[in-house]
Amino acid sequence: MRQLDVYLGESLIGRIVENRKGGRFEYEQSIVGKLAGRPVLSMAFPAKVRPFGEAKTSAWFNGLLPEGNRRDEVCRSLGVLPYDWIGLLAEIGWECAGAVRVFEHAGG
């Protein structure tokens, strides 16, 4: 299963871990230790130990991606299925609008 690293600015804040139902976002322990209960990505994503569910994770991170015809074009050019939001984030998440950037997990 794929893993994606999520950055806010230059700081690694968490990871999306793919599973059979989609993917779940979880914060880095250092972020939880410093900011427990406080919003980091958004008000809907306060820092906590437990991962966020698949539906919430998918909805929020899909919001960073193109929609409609533009999404279809990007997916086609990259060879990614339009419903594969994790695959699309792995390909273009480094250039999302705003301060959030997503990269394929480097390992470890």
Image (cartoon, helix red, strand yellow):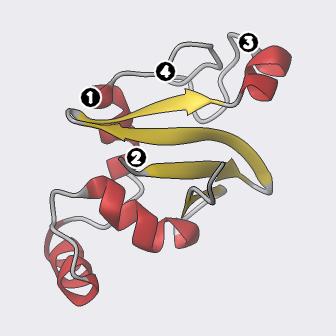
Crowding at dot 2, Cα within 10 Å, few <14 / some 14-19 / many 20+, comes out as some
User: Which residue is drawn at the image coordinates 62% and 55% (left, top)?
Assistant: 107
Q: CA distance from mark 2 to mark 4?
A: 14 Å
Query: Taking 60 as reference, is 38 above or below it?
Result: above
Q: Which of the marked residues, 1 or 2, is nearer the chain's N terminus?
A: 1
Could you say whether the residue bearing mark 2 is in a helix, strand or loop?
helix
Above or below 57: residue 76? below
- Nearer mark to the viewer, of 4 and 3: 4
Whichever of labels 2 and 4 marks the residue nearer the N terminus, that label is 4
Kind of element beneath mark 3: loop
* Disc sitting over residue 61 in the figure: 2
Looking at marks 3 and 2 on the same chain, the residue that comes earlier in the sequence is marked by: 3
How many other residues sit within 10 Å of disc 4, few (<14), some (14-19) or many (≥20)?
Answer: some
What x and y, as percent, mark residue 63? 36, 50
Q: Amino acid at mark 1?
A: Ala
> Disc 2 residue type?
Phe
Residue 81: x %, y % from top left: 15, 68
Q: Calculate the distance from the C-alpha at mark 1 to the C-alpha at mark 2.
A: 10 Å
> Which residue, as the protein is rendered here, is positioned at the far right?
34
Q: Which residue is mark 1?
A: 55
- Kind of residue sitting beneath label 3: Ala
Which of 46 and 11 lies nearest the eye of the viewer? 11
Instruction: Looking at the image, tell me whether mark 1 or mark 3 is earlier in sequence order.
Output: 3
How much space separates mark 4 and mark 3, taking CA atoms? 13 Å
> Which residue is identified by label 3?
36
- On the picture, is 33 further left or further right than 63? right
